[in-house]
Amino acid sequence: MRLRKLSDEYRGRVIVESRAFPLRPSPEAGVPWKGTYREQGWQRCAAMSAGDGIVFTPWPHDALPGWSLPALEAAKCVVKQAPDLFDRVHLALYRAFFTESRNIGDPAEVIRIVGDAAPLDMTVFVADYRAGIGRQGVATDWEAAAEHHVTSIPTVIVPATGRALVGLADLSTYRAVMEEALAA
């Protein structure tokens, strides 16, 4: 949300690109939640992003979805069909997971979320999605992130300066990094 806000503010001067980064490249069953660092991180993110209008509902289940690759692949399929709808779908997937406690690791659930979020040709989207069209784009993004030693999200990499911000930063930090990049 913060980067999207600044992207609008700096329109024409700064390009903000979203890249896919699966924390788990392969599914893992029974990812523990209650009492783990994951639950604590969720609570920290909720507190840090409250002013941005983002709601983190405590995950009501004992285990988290085993991966996010289905959601990341779906976003790539959306970009293939309608790049201008990426932000809308990305936000819908984000809200589905963090606010509504929906399983974005379940392809059928992801299809429902995308269908509700964007006016796409769902026949084309579902065909592309089931054919794995988005997987190569996710793999390419993951390889690029690995080259930059990315291990967590969010990570913001600024090519003009070589800086990397790991973890959620406040608006003034992001703005300072953009100003630094423009001056470089």
Image (spheres, helix red, strand yellow):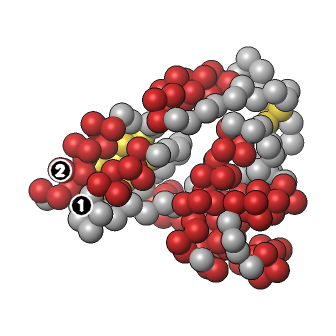
In the displayed structure image, the side of residue 66 where residue 165 appears, left or right: left
Q: Secondary structure at mark 2?
A: helix
Residue 126: image quadrant is bottom right
Labels 1 and 2 touching (C-beta < 8 A): yes
Amino acid type indicated by mark 2: Glu
Q: Say if residue 139 shows up in the picture.
A: no
Q: Secondary structure at mark 1?
A: loop
Around disc 2, counting alpha carbons within 10 Å, would you say few (fewer than 14), some (14 to 19), or many (20 or more)? some
Observer-nearest of 82 and 174: 82
Relative to 146, say whether 61 is above or below.
Answer: above
Residue lying at 27% horizontally and 58% vertically, measured from the top left:
10
Mark 2 — residue? Answer: 180
Mark 1 — residue? Answer: 160
Residue 85: image quadrant is bottom right
Q: Earlier in the sequence, mark 1 or mark 2?
A: 1
Q: Say if residue 178 shows up in the picture.
A: yes
Mark pair 1, 2: CA separation = 9 Å
- Rendered location of residue 69, percent (x, y): 72, 57
Q: Looking at the rendering, in which quadrant would you find the C terminus?
A: bottom left
The disc at residue 95 is none
- Rendered location of residue 41, percent (x, y): 59, 26
- Rendered location of residue 151, percent (x, y): 53, 45
Residue 181: image quadrant is bottom left
- Rendered location of residue 102, percent (x, y): 79, 43
Residue lying at 57% horizontally and 65% vertically, measured from the top left:
86
Relative to 73, say whether 26 is above or below.
Answer: above
